[in-house]
Image: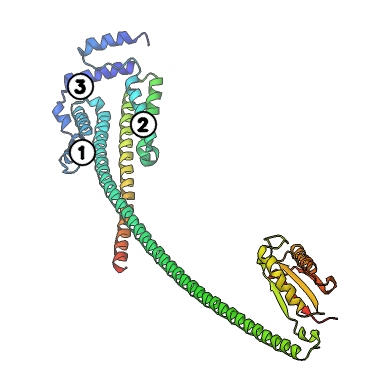
C-alpha cells in the first residue's frame, strides 16, 4: 500500500509541477505510429468499411491512448495496437468470407452444370439403349415373321404331302378295286370253267385266299351285337362261304385294339354263320388286338 | 480487505483533490470475466492451431491476471485481463480470417477442377 501511496504522490507531482501537456503526450511517436496505421486502414478502399464495429472500437482505444495518463500508456498502447489489428484482421476476414461466398456461388453453379451434363449424358445413353432395344425388338419380330413364314411353308408342304398321301391312298384304293375286279373276273372265269368242267378242287378256287369284310357299322358301337345293316349282310357272307364248299373259314375281327370286343364280335359272327347252316368245324373265329383293325374279315382258306 | 485501505483512500482523495488515481480495492471481476469468456470463445473457434501466438499470449495474460488478482494486485490484474481480452479477440479474428481463406482456397481449387471437367466434356461432346 505504501507503494500505491508513493505512486499517488508521483502522479500528483507530475500533474501539478511537471505540467506535461497532454498534447505533447498525444503527439509522441507511438501515437503517431498507431494513428497512421489506423488512418491507412480507414482509408483502405477495400478494408476501410468492412468492419465498422471494430473500427469504432479501435478509434475509441486510440482516443483513450491519446488521452490516457502516462501510467496507463503501455497498457492503452497495447490495447490500441491490438484493436487496430483486430479491426484490420476482421475486415480482411470479412473480405475473405465475401470471396468465399462468391466462390461458393460459382461452385454451386458449376456443380449444377456438372449435374445437368451428367443427366444429359444419362439421357443420351438411355435413348441409345432404347434405340438398341427397339432394333433388337424389330430383329426379333422379323425373325418371328420369318419363322412363321417357314412354318406356313412347312404346313403347306405337309399339306402337299397329305394331299400326296391321299392321292396315293386313292391310287391304292383304285388298285385294290382293280385287283378286286380282276379277282372277281378270275373267279367268274373259274366259276364259268367249273360250270363247264364240274370237279374243280374248291381249294384251288380259294387258293388266293378270297376274302370278304364286314365293316365296323355291322356292329352296335362298343358291342358285339349286329346292327340291322350287319344282320342283313350275314346272308351275303353265307353265300360267299357256300361258294367255296370245303374251304376253311377264318373269321378275324378287329375292334380298334380292344381284343375282348374283337373276340366277342368274331364269336358273334361265327354263331350267326353256324345258325345259318355253315358247319361249325369249318370256322375259326379270332379277335385281333391290332389297333388299326376294325370290322370283320372273312377269309376262305384251302382245307388242311 | 486490509483495514488500511479506507485511510489511504481518504488521504489520496484529500491530496489529489479528487484525482482518480486510487487503486481498486476489489478484484476486477468484470474484466477478468470478459477475458475468460473471450479466451474460451477463441479456443472453441480453434485459435490454438490457427493463431497460436496470439492464443498463447491470451492464455499467459489471463493466468498472470488471475495470479495478480490472487495476490490482490487488482490494478495489474485488470491490466493483464484487458490485454488477454484483446489477445483473445485478435486470435479469434485471425482464426476467422484463416478459416475463410482456407475455405476460399478449397473452393477455388474445386471450381478449377469443375471447370476443367466442363471444358473436357464440351470438347468430348464436340468430338463425338
**Front-most of residues A289 and B67:** A289
Residue assigned mark 2: B41
**Front-most of residues A256 and A149:** A256
Asked which secondary structure carries label 1, the reply is loop
**Front-most of residues B99 and A60:** B99
CA neighbours of label 1 inside 10 A, class few (<14), some (14 to 19), many (20+): many
| Spot occupied by residue A33 in the image (x, y as percentages of width and height) | 19, 38
Judging from the image, mark 2 belongs to the subunit labelled: B
Q: Viewed as shown, does residue A6 lie left or right of A224?
A: left
Q: Viewed as shown, does residue A15 lie left or right of A220?
A: left
Q: Which mark is residue A14?
A: 3
Can residue A294 be spotted in the picture?
no
State which mark lies toward you, 3 or 1. 1
Q: Earlier in the sequence, mark 3 or mark 1?
A: 3
Asked which secondary structure carries label 3, the reply is helix
Residue assigned mark 1: A50
Q: Residue A16's image quarter?
A: top left
Judging from the image, mark 1 belongs to the subunit labelled: A
| Spot occupied by residue A259 in the image (x, y as percentages of width and height) | 76, 65
Q: CA distance from mark 2 to mark 1?
A: 22 Å
Can residue A45 be spotted in the picture?
yes
Say whether marks 3 and 1 touch (CB < 8 Å). no
Amino acid at each position: 500500500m505504501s507503494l500505491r501511496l508513493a505512486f499517488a504522490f508521483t502522479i500528483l507531482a507530475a500533474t501539478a509541477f511537471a505540467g506535461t501537456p497532454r498534447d505533447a503526450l498525444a503527439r509522441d511517436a507511438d501515437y503517431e505510429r498507431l494513428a497512421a496505421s489506423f488512418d491507412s486502414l480507414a482509408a483502405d478502399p477495400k478494408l476501410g468499411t468492412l468492419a465498422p464495429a471494430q473500427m469504432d472500437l479501435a478509434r475509441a482505444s486510440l482516443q483513450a491512448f491519446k488521452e490516457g495518463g502516462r501510467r496507463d500508456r503501455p497498457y492503452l498502447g497495447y490495447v490500441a495496437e491490438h484493436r487496430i489489428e483486430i479491426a484490420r484482421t476482421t475486415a480482411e476476414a470479412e473480405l475473405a468470407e465475401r470471396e468465399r461466398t462468391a466462390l461458393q456461388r460459382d461452385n454451386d453453379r458449376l456443380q449444377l452444370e456438372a449435374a445437368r451434363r451428367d443427366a444429359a449424358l444419362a439421357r443420351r445413353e438411355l435413348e441409345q439403349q432404347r434405340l438398341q432395344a427397339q432394333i433388337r425388338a424389330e430383329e426379333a419380330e422379323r425373325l418371328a415373321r420369318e419363322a412363321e413364314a417357314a412354318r406356313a411353308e412347312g404346313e403347306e408342304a405337309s399339306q402337299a404331302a397329305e394331299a400326296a398321301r391321299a392321292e396315293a391312298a386313292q391310287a391304292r384304293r383304285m388298285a385294290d378295286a382293280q385287283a378286286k375286279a380282276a379277282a372277281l373276273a378270275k373267279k367268274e372265269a373259274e366259276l364259268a370253267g367249273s360250270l363247264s368242267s364240274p370237279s374243280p378242287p374248291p381249294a384251288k378256287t380259294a387258293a388266293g385266299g378270297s376274302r370278304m369284310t364286314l365293316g365296323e357299322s355291322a356292329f352296335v358301337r362298343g358291342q358285339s351285337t349286329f346292327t340291322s345293316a350287319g344282320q342283313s349282310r350275314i346272308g351275303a357272307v353265307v353265300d360267299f362261304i357256300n361258294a367255296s364248299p370245303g374251304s376253311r373259314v377264318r373269321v378275324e375281327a378287329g375292334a380298334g385294339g380292344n381284343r375282348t370286343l374283337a373276340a366277342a364280335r368274331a364269336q358273334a359272327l361265327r354263331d350267326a354263320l353256324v345258325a345259318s347252316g355253315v358247319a361249325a368245324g369249318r370256322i375259326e373265329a379270332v379277335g385281333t388286338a391290332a389297333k388299326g383293325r376294325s370290322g370283320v374279315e372273312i377269309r376262305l382258306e384251302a382245307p388242311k | 480487505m486490509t483495514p488500511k485501505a479506507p485511510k489511504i483512500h481518504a488521504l489520496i482523495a484529500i491530496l489529489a483533490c479528487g484525482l482518480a488515481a486510487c487503486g481498486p480495492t476489489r478484484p476486477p471481476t468484470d474484466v477478468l470475466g470478459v477475458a475468460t469468456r473471450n479466451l474460451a470463445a477463441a479456443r472453441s473457434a480453434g485459435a490454438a492451431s490457427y493463431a497460436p501466438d496470439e492464443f498463447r499470449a491470451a492464455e499467459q495474460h489471463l493466468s498472470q491476471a488471475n495470479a495478480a488478482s490472487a495476490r490482490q494486485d487488482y490494478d495489474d490484474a485488470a491490466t493483464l485481463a484487458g490485454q488477454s481480452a484483446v489477445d483473445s479477440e485478435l486470435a479469434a479474428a485471425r482464426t476467422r480470417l484463416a478459416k475463410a481463406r482456407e475455405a476460399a482456397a478449397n473452393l477455388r481449387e474445386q471450381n478449377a477442377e469443375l471447370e476443367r471437367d466442363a471444358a473436357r466434356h464440351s470438347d468430348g461432346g464436340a468430338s463425338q
